[in-house]
C-alpha cells in the first residue's frame, strides 16, 4: 500500500545544494527518511523503507530527534545521542537494510529540527503502533504535511512488533556486554 501511494508522487532527488544525488547508474536516488518514534513504529517504517529501497532505488536515512528542555544544555547529552545511535543501528540490522544513514539530533522543537534536516521532496515515513489513538505520530504527520513534506504513517503489526523490539533490545545488550568485557 505504501508503494502505491509513493508511486503517485512527483519525486526528485535533489540535495540541499540542488545537485541530483545518483547511484552508480546515474539515475537520481529518492530520499526516504524514517523518523524515529518508538522501537515498534520505527521497525515498521524501516520495513516499508526496505520495500521502497528495492523497488524505487531509494536512499534511506533514519532521523532520530531528542527534544531537550530549555533547562538543559546540549553539551551534557552526548550519552543520550550515543544511545539513540546504537539503538538505530540495532534496528537497521534487524530490518536487514544496507547503506542506511543514521542522524541523531538534539533540538528544542521536533518539527523545526525535522524541517531543517529533511531534503526537498523527500518521503517521510513515521512509524506508529496500531491503536486507535496514535496521537503523537498523527500530529507529527500533519505538521510535516503542512510544511510541504510527503509524510506517511506506517502502522506496525502487533503480532510481530513486540517480538522484534525484544530482539533489538537483546542485540543492544549483547553489544554492550562485548564492549564492556
Image: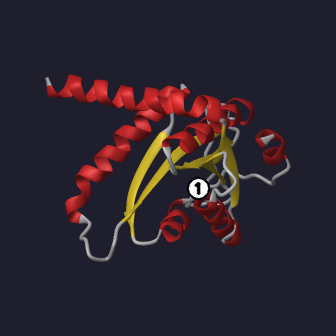
Picture quadrant of residue 179: top left
| Image coords of residue 114 (percent x, y) | 52, 63
| Image coords of residue 62 (percent x, y) | 51, 45
Q: Which residue is found at the position 31% from the left and 77% from the top? A: 70
Q: Which residue is found at the position 21% from the left and 64% from the top? A: 75
| Image coords of residue 30 (percent x, y) | 67, 45
| Image coords of residue 110 (percent x, y) | 49, 66
Task: Judge whether 67 appears above or below 8 on screen.
Answer: below
Task: Judge whether 106 appears above or below 112 on screen.
Answer: above
**Which is more toward the observer, 13 or 85?**
85
Task: Report whether 35 appears left or right of 56.
Answer: left
Q: Is mark 1 on a helix, strand or loop?
A: loop
Q: In which quarter of the image is the N terminus?
A: top right
Residue ID for mark 1 = 15
Query: Residue furthest toward the front?
Result: 132
Total numbered badges shown on the rendered structure: 1
Q: Is any atom of residue 76 visible in this view? A: yes
Q: Which residue is found at the position 63% from the left and 30% from the top? A: 159
Q: Is any atom of residue 97 visible in this view? A: no
**Which is more toward the observer, 148 or 2?**
2
Amino acid at each position: 500500500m505504501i508503494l502505491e501511494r509513493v508511486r503517485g508522487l512527483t519525486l526528485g532527488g535533489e540535495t540541499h545544494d540542488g545537485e541530483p544525488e545518483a547511484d552508480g547508474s546515474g539515475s537520481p536516488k529518492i530520499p526516504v527518511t524514517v523518523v524515529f518514534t518508538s522501537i515498534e513504529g520505527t521497525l515498521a517504517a524501516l520495513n516499508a523503507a526496505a520495500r521502497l529501497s528495492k523497488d524505487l532505488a531509494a536512499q534511506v536515512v533514519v532521523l532520530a530527534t531528542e527534544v531537550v528542555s530549555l533547562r538543559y544544555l546540549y553539551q551534557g547529552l552526548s550519552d543520550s545521542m550515543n544511545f539513540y545511535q546504537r539503538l538505530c543501528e540495532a534496528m537497521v540490522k534487524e530490518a536487514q537494510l544496507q547503506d542506511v544513514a543514521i542522524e541523531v539530533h538534539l533540538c528544542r522543537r521536533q518539527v523545526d529540527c525535522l524541517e531543517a534536516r529533511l531534503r526537498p521532496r523527500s518521503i517521510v515515513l513515521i512509524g506508529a503502533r496500531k491503536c486507535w489513538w496514535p496521537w503523537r505520530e498523527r500530529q507529527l504527520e500533519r505538521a510535516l504535511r503542512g510544511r510541504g513534506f510527503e509524510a506517511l504513517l506506517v502502522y506496525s503489526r502487533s503480532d510481530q512488533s513486540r517480538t522484534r523490539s525484544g530482539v533489538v533490545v537483546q542485540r543492544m545488550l549483547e553489544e554492550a556486554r562485548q564492549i564492556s568485557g
